[in-house]
Amino acid sequence: LYQDLDEKIDRLAQIVDIDTAPDDALPVLASWMGLSLEPGFLSPEEMRLLLKNAYGLLTKKGTREAIEGVVRLFVKEEFFIVERNLLPPGQTQSMDSIYGETPYDFSVLINAHPDEYLLAKLQMLVNQFKPVRVRVNFVFLKACDGLDAFTYLGVNSTVSGSSTGALDQTNQLDGLTF
């Protein structure tokens, strides 16, 4: 009886260690730190990464540094955080869809193609580290938008050179003959 109890006590250190804990124990460890993580939403590797950085992030909870830290854990591309209250007054009126509607809003501009799974992860995590009344908006920026002959350039747009289309190995669509 005492032998079994000693073995359970010896294994306890492995269960509460982030690196050696079983995958199903990671959401419990996160809840002990005040984080709400649904099982299966993050991979075990992502949960371990978040838990290893959780103490530093939680000490900065509610600040820009905490938001940057959370986003940096999951976004490998370049990103920018734009706080609406720091923008010049005339610049925000026409850009409510990007920068938000109130001074309490901020946007995270991510220089990557849209990814719904990444967006859901970021929304869940950033909502746990942002101040209560603050709203966040995530904007994914593509490298450029394609244009046809009757459109205007946007902020992130570029005009690409014309190219010929190919039907097969010998026939091309060059605009003159088909």
Image (cartoon, rainbow, N blue to C red):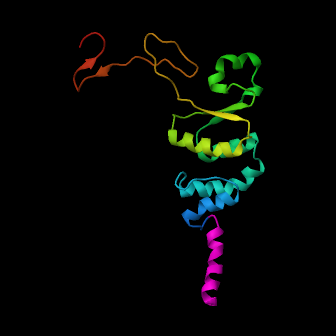
Q: Position of residue 5 (x, y in %)?
A: 63, 84
Of residue 143 and residue 37, the one placed in the foreground of this image is 37
- Residue 145 is left or right of residue 100, and the answer is left
Task: Work out whether 126 lies above or below 82.
Answer: below
Q: Quadrant of residue 177?
A: top left
Q: Position of residue 123 (x, y in %)?
A: 61, 41
Q: Nearer the viewer, residue 163 or 94?
A: 94
Q: Which residues are magenta?
A: 1-18
* Residue farthest to the left, as pictured: 170
Main SS of the magenta part reads helix
Magenta segment includes 4: yes
Task: Tell me the quadrant of the picture where the N terminus can be found.
Answer: bottom right
In the rendered image, the quadrant that contains the C terminus is: top left
Q: How many marks?
A: 0
Vertical comparison of 56 with 12: above or below: above
State whether residue 25 appears in this view.
Answer: yes
Residue at 23% x, 26% y: name it: 168
